[in-house]
Amino acid sequence: MATAVAVGGLGRPRPLSTYHYNVAIGACRKTSAWETALQLTEALQAHKVRADLVTFNSGLGVAAAAAAWPCALFWLWEVSDSQLRADVITVSSAVSACEKGESWRAAVHLLTESWQTQVRPNVVTYNSTVSALARGGWQRALRIVDDFPQGRLEPDVVTFSAGAVATEVEGQWTMGISLLRAMMVEGVRLNSFAYNSAISTAASAASWEAAVALLEDCGLSADAFGYSGAIMACGRGRAWEVALCLQRELLASRVVSNQVTWNSVIGACEVSGLWQTAVHLLCAMRDSEVRRTVVSFSSAVGACERSGLWRVALQLLLDMLSARIRCNAIGFNSAISACSRGSQWRKALAVLQFMSEVSVPPDRVSFNSAISAVAVKGKVQAALQLVASLRGADLAPGAATLTAAAGACDVAGRCSQWPQALQLFVEFDRCRLQPTTTSRQTAANACAKALQWQQALLACSGYCSTRGHGDLPLHNLAVIAYEAGGKWQQLRRVLPVLDEEVYAVLFQAFKLGDDPHGSGL
């Protein structure tokens, strides 16, 4: 690294000064080159050039631009070690680096330390801290907003907007709206970002009425992101008519729609199963020269899934591939599920195999959907092979996987399938999974059909952990199994939902059956 510069064009070098290093470090901010800035600081110290506060503030500015919060803390420590007094720029830059680096704890600590060192933070410092707290807790963010008057500072739109983002992350949409009202009371001029944050918060809570009301309050400042958030809220709240109305309103306005708005509308159709409208919107995107994405197609395929329209779902997959759009597992999973609902188990297996051919790794949902497809048709061997393939893909079977596979054994209705059903039930314990009522009932059914009463009792044995009035089929199986096994005395264990009168009738009936003379009465 050069340590001298030419002066007066005579080529005689002179040592670099603090000023030169400060300029060089400051230039690193444009490219966020914090490593270079750090090297310059080390070179300055190595050549015994005295660093001043501008040196470290410049370095902190680079760290903030690069979101390198550990580096910012290092420079902050260097300020203290050099016996320099930090100013508000020092603290604000360090807090900004922590905010961009998603280290909210460090940001809060620095804000607290600034008061103890008598460095009064400014609005920028507070805003950066509130923004950092969007990932660390909306309650802390709101407390900092409330502390503004104590610091004799006036919160601006950035402050409230950052607080709204914090409430959005935590799903506290009512608090987000309260912040908007507080902004109005404080006379803060609202911008689209503040409204969009509150709309997005309402969307995450599926409160579509609040989202639409906020969009209306935006007036002329409403943009594509605001519309997208409101449409998304309508989709989650199954208010698809309102979502389509907002889409038409958007197209008629001067606001330029984007992929997000179109995808939000198609997503609303997916939730409500409006496959025809979803496909129509997909075509409208192409006609409007709006680039369709994997989200666009996947949402349309998902709309077909709910109606079992496997032909349309598969055609949409082919259209997506023809458009050279990079696919993910979501669209394929919906197509497999559509084939399952349409009783097309062979097509479901073909789609699962096709995923590997187009370099889309199947996930657990892919296998579960395919297993459900073959289970409905009682294809036991196919279900077991899929479970093995899932393990071969380094995926652990879940409760849904094992339950669906055991269902194939039950649907098959053949006496020879009970060992496989029971084996799948035992897998719950091996995989450290809690057996569900459905899994117990499925295994017990398969064993009961084969008159394997002891095995049926094994499947029913743990029913107490899941007992409830909704588990009556499982109770009935246990009753049959105990009766067939000659263990009527143990019925009391499996009939906690029956009252005393009913149990007394059963007791007398079984006792009469044991007494050939009927003297038990």
Image (cartoon, rainbow, N blue to C red):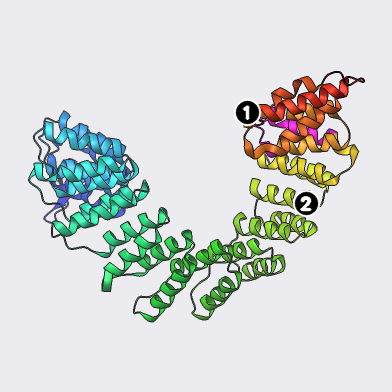
| Residues drawn in magenta | 419-438
- Is disc 1 placed on a helix, strand or loop? helix
The quarter of the picture where the N terminus appears is top left
- Is disc 2 placed on a helix, strand or loop? helix
Describe residue 348's horizontal placement relative to residue 296 as left or right. right
315 over 469 or under it: above or below:
below
Give the labeled residue for mark 1: 465
Give the labeled residue for mark 2: 376
Task: Name the amino acid type tagged 1.
Answer: Ser
Q: Nearer the viewer, residue 482 or 461?
A: 482
Q: Position of residue 439 (x, y in %)?
A: 71, 37
**What residue sits 29% from the left and 61% below the top?**
195
Describe residue 391's horizontal placement relative to residue 146 as left or right. right
Alpha carbon separation for disc pair 1 and 2? 28 Å
Q: Position of residue 139 (x, y in %)?
A: 27, 41
**What residue sits 74% from the left and 61% below the top?**
342
Q: Nearer the viewer, mark 1 or mark 2?
A: 1
Question: Can residue 48 be seen in the rendering of this structure?
Answer: no
* Magenta span contains residue 437: yes
Q: Main structural element of the magenta stretch: helix, strand or loop?
A: helix
N-terminal of the pair, mark 1 or mark 2, is 2
Q: Position of residue 433 (x, y in %)?
A: 64, 32
The answer to which image quadrant residue 447 occupies is top right
Task: Name the amino acid type tagged 2.
Answer: Val
* Magenta span contains residue 70: no
**What residue sits 44% from the left and 63% below the top?**
234
**What residue sits 36% from the left and 45% below the top?**
170
Q: Nearer the viewer, residue 356 or 309?
A: 309
Disc 1 residue crowd, few under 14, some 14–19, many 20+, Cα 10 Å? few
Q: Nearer the viewer, residue 211 or 510?
A: 510
